[in-house]
Image: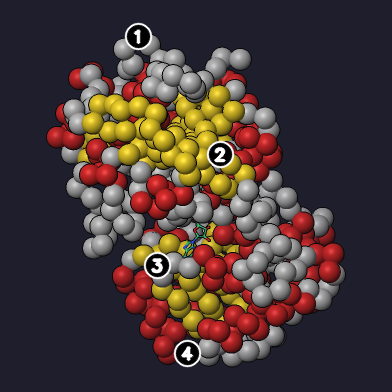
Amino acid sequence: MRILQVSAELFPLLKTGGLADVAGALPLALAAAGEDVRVLLPGFPALRAGVHHAAQVAEFRTPWGETARLLYGHIELNARQRIGTYLIDAPALYDRPGNPYEDANRQPYGDNHRRFALLGWAAAQLAQGLDGHWHPEVVHAHDWHAALAPAYLAHAPGGARSRSVFTIHNLAYQGLFGAWAFADLGLPAEAFSIDGLEYHGQVSFMKAGLHYADRLTTVSPSYAREVQTPAQGHGLDGLLRARAGVLHGILNAVDDAVWNPAIDTLIPQPFSMPEGRRMAGKARSKAEVQHALGLAVDARAPLFVLVSRLTEQKGLHLVLEGLDALLAQGGQLALLGSGDAWLQDAFRARAAAAPSRVSATIGYDEALAHRLFAAGDVTLVPSMFEPCGLTQMYGLKYGALPLVHRVGGLADTVVDCTLEDMADGTANGFAFDGFDATAYARAVRRAFALHDRPADWRRVRATGMRQPFDWRAAAAQYIDVYQRALGH
Ligand code: ADP
Ligand code: GLC
């Protein structure tokens, strides 16, 4: 099957969150399954720099009448594996350093509707034959940035030559623009209606994806159910209920070549389960991180780690409210994150007040993220909502037991250490219901209680470290969805 993956970020070239990890792993898994997969990316400087041997395929008109170029080359994923990649060359739109969505003052760029309409537009042009040598049978668009692709295909003059699949990575980010933006999109007037991409008088890229795609997926089975409820549907639950028959929940996986403590070159000493109980590499990681971050170097103090965008979604006020109790029980906290100023300030202040027990690194640091999971005893992910969540899976792989709010993908990956689950051997972490300080504090107490029982702790940790979270399984499910989109 010829499949085009369309995404605004891709690890290791450009990443602001989990979308990049998925966009960097899924093409490899599809290729390994024998599919003919290519990628389409906007020409942000970091992406451009990563596309090797880029040569022009075609020149084409944007919907608003300018000229852009389509290049084709390849990217190298996991060091050696090549994936054929199209890049949209439109410097006036994309040649801006830093965050792909926002300017240096964290304001969305004023022409984002054009910057991301062009991504969907180029995908649809490719489907209609822009590259005479290759055209996709399935266009798979990720998140609102790529969500106009299904709309352009649905309205293609002469009919669509490809089927479309749209994946919701996070329904909270919808790509909403004033009605004025519609004129730039090159869609027929009827598209700006309730049976199109109009959303309460605005243009919604997300709604375009949800309305027009042949098949929809989201990144965990639980989130697929949650988005159909008013509480988590962000105003689009009605549409999602109406399309429930074509909506699939496919759990993300972990790229074993990137997140694997047995071969990780970013941590001081690799480690793995067969090494047995000692896991010398994990102990060394913990001591190294404690030292590097100025925490007391103490093997016995449970180290809680947190690697996250600092936004309301992530439930970080619970961590702040529960921090005194965590410290009183003898724990340490090491946070790595960036985002909302008030959260950055709050964690910085807590670190300044207790530097030997709390550390806050504000910024983005891929290597430190690896070192923290390797060092940590517990990975905190108390998100208010979480479509999938990757850090709890990284915590599981690296033996840092996840402590999570039981929602979305967190509910699908973490089994609490209650007595029954301990008995049947499925427990792998701590999960709380009820998004409040009491429920969170209780989960933290359960973590300390388990830590006081080293044999049980090791058993639970081993359960997590053995879980596969294999992209092969996820890719097989996507292939099934593509087949259905094609009517097979
Ligand atoms: P989301 O996509 O909502 O941010 P995920 O858990 O799916 O949440 O993915 C987050 C990804 O971003 C993970 O790979 C995580 O390690 C990474 N990450 C988040 N914040 C940082 C940071 N400050 N430095 C390095 N990596 C980070
Ligand atoms: C989004 C979600 C996150 C998910 C990621 C990758 O950013 O917030 O839960 O893991 O996409 O699918």
State the image quarter where residue 284 is shown.
Answer: bottom right
Name the N-terminal-most of marks 1 and 4.
1
CB-based contact (under 8 Å), mark 4 and mark 3: no
Graded by Cα atoms within 10 Å as few (under 14), some (14 to 19) or many (20 or more), the crowding at tag 3 reads some
Read off the residue under disc 3.
Answer: 338
Task: Choose the circle earlier in sequence order: 4 or 2.
Answer: 2
The answer to whether residue 167 shows anywhere in this view is: no
What whole-number distance in Å separates the C-alpha atoms at marks 2 and 3? 31 Å
Q: Nearer the viewer, mark 3 or mark 1?
A: 1
The residue under label 1 is which amino acid type?
Gly
Q: Position of residue 453 (x, y in %)?
A: 78, 77
Q: Which mark is residue 96?
A: none
Type of residue at label 3? Ser
Mark 2 is surrounded, within 10 Å at the Cα level, by few (under 14), some (14 to 19) or many (20 or more) other residues, namely many
Nearer the observer: mark 4 or 2; the answer is 2
Quadrant where the image shows the C terminus = top right
Q: Which residue is mark 1?
A: 158
Instruction: Say what secondary structure mark 2 lies in.
Output: strand
Q: Which mark is residue 83?
A: 2
Say how many tags the image has.
4
Q: Of tags 1 and 4, which is closer to the observer?
A: 1
- Contact? badges 2 and 3 (CB < 8 Å): no
Amino acid identity at mark 2: Ile
* Residue 214, above or below 15: above
Mark 3 CB lies closer than 8 A to ligand 1: yes
Residue at the disc numbered 4: 354
Q: Is mark 4 within 8 Å of ligand 1?
A: no
**Quadrant where the image shows the N terminus:** top right
Q: CA distance from mark 4 to mark 2?
A: 47 Å
